[in-house]
Image: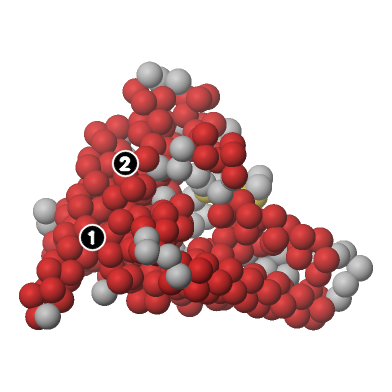
């Protein structure tokens, strides 16, 4: 039950404050600390002169070192917290930066305002901060499409998944998930540099997101106002996505809004002819992006409702 209190507290703090720039300038952010460790291990184990098999082994060692480092730090913190009279409060503060509820909302709102001002260049810069695809030549419709795709995927990776693992295993589960996800975002690419080195991290990220991605899709369906239609679109289209997980929240949001997502795109100058998700859906508009933000807010409220309901149920049983 303590893990539910910790996660609920972290959610509420993140909604209100996000991760303030003053704190970031002062101490950085846990994800940037993880990133520094990953960059160091990248330089050690992913050198050009190494064989592909050694790079694969080095990637596995990198994954294990990062997980063990994070677990050790969190367990030591928890041991220290046990000796204080306000350990629960400290645990909530530690959990807080591992959620990205506020920052995701701010990013998407910024894109919406840029597009409402018809400033496509600024919108392209804003979108480039949250997607991996090329944005320099994207038109208004594709900027909106990219934003919707990123919102759906990041709802799973940045919010539902860390909450899920945090509820199950407390701070260790939350922190380990975050380091795995950070590894995937930094080295889990299928390009020449990271194909072998990032293999283990990419596979582990796929594994830890299997359940959260499906939960995210169901949550979007629940807040859509058209539950059965959204779930049917999700089930019919999710496997069209190259990722074994990202297709579920993306297809669910596409059904909730009845827009078509995914489709042909360009990564690092290479054009890819991806299939459409919800091919018969509408072309996304600013109205859809505005509605998506509302659905996102409802989803967060629904998560809070479930956590509070569980806590009330546990207290009533006691």
Q: Quadrant of residue 287?
A: top left
User: Which is more toward the observer, 94 or 199?
Assistant: 94
User: Which is more toward the observer, 172 or 138?
Assistant: 172
Q: Quadrant of residue 51?
A: bottom right
Give the left or right position of residue 304, taking residue 195 as reference.
left
Which colour scheme appears in the figure?
A: secondary structure
Residue name at image x 56 percent, y 65 percent:
179
Q: Is residue 24 visible?
A: yes
Q: What is the distance, in whole Å, between disc 1 and disc 2 at their CAs?
A: 16 Å
Checking the image for residue 108, the label placed there is none
How many other residues sit within 10 Å of disc 2, few (<14), some (14-19) or many (≥20)?
Answer: few
Q: Quadrant of residue 43?
A: bottom right
Image quarter of the C terminus: bottom left
Q: Give residue 251's position: percent from left, percent from top.
A: 32, 59
Residue denoted by label 1? 303
How many other residues sit within 10 Å of disc 1, few (<14), some (14-19) or many (≥20)?
Answer: some
Which of pointers 1 and 2 indicates the residue nearer the eye? Answer: 2
Residue name at image x 37 percent, y 64 percent:
85
Q: Secondary structure at mark 1?
A: helix
User: Which is more toward the observer, 129 or 13?
Assistant: 13
Give the left or right position of residue 177, taking residue 26 as reference.
left
Q: Give residue 24's position: percent from left, percent from top.
A: 55, 40
Q: Give residue 52's position: percent from left, percent from top.
A: 81, 76
Q: Secondary structure at mark 2?
A: helix
Q: Give residue 82's position: percent from left, percent from top.
A: 43, 71
Give the left or right position of residue 256, taking residue 154 as reference.
left
Residue denoted by label 2? 16
Residue name at image x 75 percent, y 80 percent:
57
């Amino acid at each position: 039950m303590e893990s539910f209190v910790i996660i609920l507290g972290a959610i509420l703090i993140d909604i209100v404050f996000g991760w303030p720039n003053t704190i970031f300038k002062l101490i950085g952010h846990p994800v940037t600390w993880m990133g520094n460790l990953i960059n160091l291990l990248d330089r050690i184990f992913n050198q050009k002169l190494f064989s592909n098999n050694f790079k694969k082994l080095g990637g596995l060692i990198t994954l294990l070192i990062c997980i063990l480092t994070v677990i050790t730090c969190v367990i030591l913190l928890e041991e220290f917290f046990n000796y204080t009279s306000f350990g629960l409060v400290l645990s909530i503060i530690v959990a807080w930066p591992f959620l990205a509820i506020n920052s995701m909302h701010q990013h998407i709102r910024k894109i919406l305002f840029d597009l409402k001002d018809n400033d496509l260049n600024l919108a392209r810069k804003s979108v480039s901060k949250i997607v991996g695809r090329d944005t320099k030549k994207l038109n208004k419709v594709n900027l909106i499409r990219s934003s919707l795709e990123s919102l759906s995927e990041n709802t799973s990776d940045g919010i539902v998944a860390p909450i899920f693992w945090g509820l199950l295993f407390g701070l260790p589960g939350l922190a380990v998930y975050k380091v795995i996800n950070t590894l995937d975002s930094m080295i889990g690419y299928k390009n020449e540099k990271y194909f072998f080195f990032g293999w283990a991290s990419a596979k582990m990220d796929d594994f830890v997101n299997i359940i959260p991605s499906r939960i995210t899709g169901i949550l979007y369906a629940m807040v859509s106002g058209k539950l059965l239609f959204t779930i049917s679109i999700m089930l019919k289209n999710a496997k069209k996505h190259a990722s074994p997980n990202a297709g579920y929240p993306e297809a669910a949001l596409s059904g909730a809004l009845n827009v078509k997502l995914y489709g042909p795109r360009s990564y690092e100058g290479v054009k890819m002819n991806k299939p459409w998700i919800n091919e018969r859906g509408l072309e996304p508009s600013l109205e859809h992006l505005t509605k998506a933000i509302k659905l996102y807010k409802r989803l967060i409220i629904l998560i809070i409702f479930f956590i509070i309901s569980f806590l009330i149920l546990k207290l009533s049983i006691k």
